[in-house]
Amino acid sequence: MFHLHRRSLIQGGSLLVPALWAGRASPLLAAQTAPATRARLNVTENPFGPSPAARKAIMACVPEAPYYVEDEHTLRDKIGQNENLEREKVALSNGSLDALSLLSSDIGRKGHLLAPQPTYATHLNYAQRRGVTVRYVPLLNHAIDLDALRQAITPETAMVYLCNPNNPTGNMLDHDKLLSFCEDVSKKVPVVVDEAYFELLPPAELMTASSLVHSGHDVIVARTFSKVYGLAGLRIGYILAQPNRVKQLYSLTTTSRNQAGYAAAMASLGDKAYLNGAIAYLKSCRNMIYDICQKNGLSFLQSHGTFVYVNTQRPAEKMKTALAQRGVDIRVFDAPAYQTWIRVGTATPAELELFGRALPAALQDVPKA
């Protein structure tokens, strides 16, 4: 039986996996008796948790807690070796969000930022609060419209932002078209490619835009250990970019890395066995969400991320409220063409089971749009 307290599930995350991998037809039907206090499906976390090696590294670094991380070079070098890049093209960040927010607000001072809609926009909203203008280009058939983005670039465009796979739709850009777009556009303005979920792409090592950094293009690839590596609470990520962009980011940062996050990232990076397990777990969670949607007659988009975008056919904000009243948090994105869509994040089986119970009642409460 699964205990329904979220933190207990996360701490024992690896114990959940065998039941899911053993071919059970419906993991949601596992015996569960007490209601979960809350289903946090509004965020994109990985309850599979850190790798065994990362857990050991975190515990081992406790004696270093009184001290600042003195040397970031080892992790930067390890990342660079994986990507065939020099250290000068790698910068660490407190999650990828800090890097995205700081660079967007700084680069954006020269004009406006250009991005698809809907997409991940926390850093773009941050830039707007700093006085930067953001312009959006609608998706085409739920996919990022690279041609429309190209046409929307003006002399005032300071930066183009792409999330691949896109959040919240989970769609993956055609790789050749993405590379062609970045090669062309980066001659005029920098292009940020947010690869927060790239480990989930098939196969990830071939779907990254990092080769453009190697060949000297003004492309900034942002990645994080928060998602597939299960280290969201330890706040560590990185960018791959030209040396001038690395220097630009470091000129804007005000904090050093934390010991636990640094140690966990060092232990996690490239752990293929762990990644295979985490990816299988996350795919099982996505399948649970698909199953719930199908049982309730809702359409959804097949996703390469740690979330699923669902068309409720009802006002999304009202659905958000109706689900919250039943202990389920989901996220709504500001996009004119997606006013009935909600994003449901992967989570523990118990949280998804609660979503499965709450959804029919919420649908009944909210009239169709």
Image (cartoon, rainbow, N blue to C red):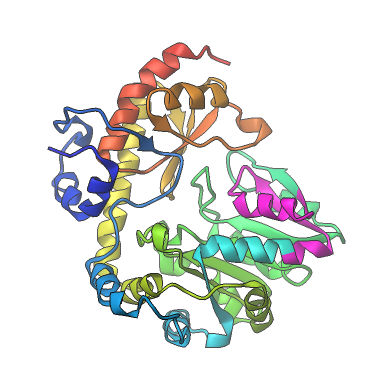
Q: Nearer the viewer, residue 293 or 318?
A: 318
- Tell me where residue 35 sits by quadrant: top left
- Tell me if 157 is positioned left or right of 12 in this view: right
Q: Residue furthest right?
A: 155
> Can you give x and y, in whole percent of width and height, for residue 22 in the image?
13, 47
Quadrant of the snapshot with the N terminus: top left
Does the magenta-highlighted stretch encompass residue 125? yes
- Tell me where residue 345 sits by quadrant: top left
**Residue at image x 64%, y 60%?**
101
Q: Nearer the viewer, residue 62 or 270?
A: 62
Count of numbered tags = 0
Q: Which residues are magenta?
A: 106-134
Q: Residue furthest front?
A: 66
**Residue at image x 47%, y 74%?**
257
Residue 86, visible in the rendered structure: no
Does the magenta-highlighted stretch encompass residue 333? no
**Residue at image x 73%, y 46%?**
136
> Can you give x and y, in whole percent of width and height, for residue 188 in the image?
79, 69
Q: Nearer the viewer, residue 69 or 28?
A: 69
Q: Nearer the viewer, residue 91 or 312?
A: 91
**Residue at image x 86%, y 59%?**
156
> Can you give x and y, in whole percent of width and height, for residue 78 in the image?
41, 83
> Can you give x and y, in whole percent of width and height, for residue 49 in the image?
29, 57
Quadrant of the snapshot with the C terminus: top right
- Tell me if 261 is positioned left or right of 15 in this view: right
- Tell me if 56 is positioned left or right of 229 in this view: left
